[in-house]
Image (tube, rainbow, N blue to C red):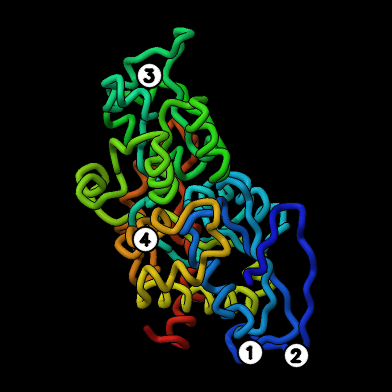
Amino acid sequence: MAFLIKRREIVTVLSAGAAMTAFGARAEGKTGSCVYPVATPTYEPQFIAQQQGYFKDEGFEFKVIQGGSGVKTREIMASRQADFAIADILHVLQLNNHGRPTRALNAVDQRAPGVRFAIRQDLIDQGIDTLQKLAAWKRPDGKKAIFGVSSIGGTSHLWSYYFADKLGIADKVTWVGVGNTDTMLGSFKSKQIDMLSASQAIIAEAEKNHWGKMVYAPSEAKTWNEVIGGPVPVNTNFCLQQTIEKEPEKVQAFMNAIWRAALFARDKTPEQTLECIRPFVGSTSDAPNLLEIKELKAVQDPNGVITPESFARGEKVWYSDLTGIKPVKLADAFDGKFLKAAQAKYPG
């Protein structure tokens, strides 16, 4: 059973054992915590590491915390309510901009898996079946169409806005944050929003229940490469520089477990991965979750290293009027030594 803890439910769990040095043997009697945004397979590395016992193998009893959105996840980690987080690298850059030195530890994927646009089914039935048509449509009260994403300022918003801007419609609609999986689907079902941009599992669940239909998928390779031009580090595992300096053994243990989780996701079938992470993704049913896990295998970063080329490719998205983020050097955004040590210990 997953040791799953939501925000404000953080507890301390102790286990016995001996300590380890930063890159040495097993660390015992240690605790740690990590936080993820919402309950979808997108964040499977933390789920797998917990369920497979990889954290415990490294001598740490980890709490896995659900943040509720990318923005809340960032806030939880930055306030030291969690040691590590998984979310868009955007949050690493934002924290650095705000005087909280933060480092990505590995790149999880090379394309944004949580960007698929679906339009409400009743609007589709009326012939409003493209994003351009929806942007030109007005709600019964005469207001702009409402586009829903998990959180304003989070991963889905960043990438959804960028692709919508390339279609010429980003400023012609109203963007709202609709929260976690349940509230995303609930707002779509109740017609509080007209378009939902979310991960494949959530969109497939909406289609299954005839609440909406996918009309545009930036996360698919052809569309992504046409607009972005190639791989970009999107979701990353990250922590404060302070954690790296003060608790390097914890960072190494975390990265060892996360790298093993990446190998598990790479080598196992989607069905095997779903069986492992099912306790974490119960808000969506198996068929949509399997679709998303298959997509994740396709977008997974094979080695987790953020290269100068992939980092430079993302700059046109990260540094914009929407984010207000000032450029950050790659050396100030990524620390790869823990990943390198993990790969040496657990060669893939």
Q: Is residue 318 visible?
A: no
CA distance for labels 3 and 4? 31 Å
The residue lying at 52 percent from left, 62 percent from top is: 237
- Nearer to us of marks 3 and 1 is 3
Q: Residue furthest front?
A: 209
Q: Is residue 302 left or right of residue 87?
A: left
Q: Nearer the viewer, mark 2 or mark 4?
A: 4
Please give the label number shown on residue 274.
none
Q: Residue at x 45, y 32 (%)?
A: 322
For this view, does 269 lie left or right of residue 14? left
Q: Amino acid at mark 4?
A: Leu
Question: In this figure, which residue is indicated by the disc labeled 4?
Answer: 296
Q: Which residue is mark 1?
A: 26
> Disc 1 marks which amino acid?
Arg
Residue 81 horizontal side relative to residue 151, left or right: right
Task: Give the class, few, some or many, for how many residues have Cα within 10 Å of label 1's Cα (few <14, many ≥20).
Answer: some
Residue under label 3, please give it: 172
Can you identify the residue that label 2 sits on? 17
Q: CA distance from mark 4 to mark 1?
A: 30 Å
